[in-house]
Amino acid sequence: MVDTYIVDANGQSALAGSVTVPADRNFRGAWVLDGTVISEDMDSAKAIFKNKIREVRKPLLEAKDVELMKALETSASTTAIATAKNALRDAPAASAIDSADTITKLKAAWDTSLLGASPY
């Protein structure tokens, strides 16, 4: 029989069956071991969350770039496109992310109107 170990963000390891593990594995990269309990480090979880926003917004920004070029070619207004691009760029800096003090609040900070369906 092979033992399974869980390694936290700091490199500490524990036998999987001997620790309490969070049910939500979305922020596994933020797990920290404290005795026999694994919890999420909120600063690390926020960094993971912001990186997910950046991943999701990349194709959205690329699509807005196409819209912008088409608008420029036809001399149409680019104001709404520029506003949408700025909102996408600002998404990782949302105050709801910085103020989140639990994983539940952090997941609720996903702006579905801007980024689409939450991956969480």
Image: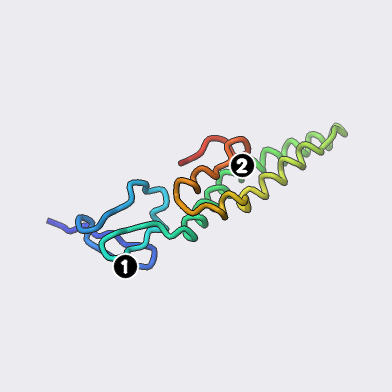
Number of marks in picture: 2
Residue 68, position in %: x, y?
Answer: 77, 38
Q: Which residue is mark 1?
A: 12
Q: Earlier in the sequence, mark 2 or mark 1?
A: 1
- Label 2, secondary structure: give it: helix
Residue 54, position in %: x, y?
Answer: 58, 49
> Dot 1: within a 10 Å radius of its alpha carbon, few (fewer than 14), some, or many (20 or more) residues?
few
- Label 1, secondary structure: give it: loop
Residue 11, position in %: x, y?
Answer: 35, 67
Q: Is residue 6 left or right of residue 73?
A: left
User: Given the image, on which type of amino acid does mark 2 rest?
Assistant: Pro
Q: Which mark is residue 59?
A: 2
Q: Is residue 5 left or right of residue 9?
A: left
As measured in the structure, the alpha-carbon distance from the residue carrying label 2 to the one carrying label 1 is: 36 Å
Q: Is residue 9 left or right of residue 43?
A: left
Image point 51% across, 55% down: which residue?
Answer: 46
Residue 85, position in %: x, y?
Answer: 71, 43
Residue sitting at the far left: 1
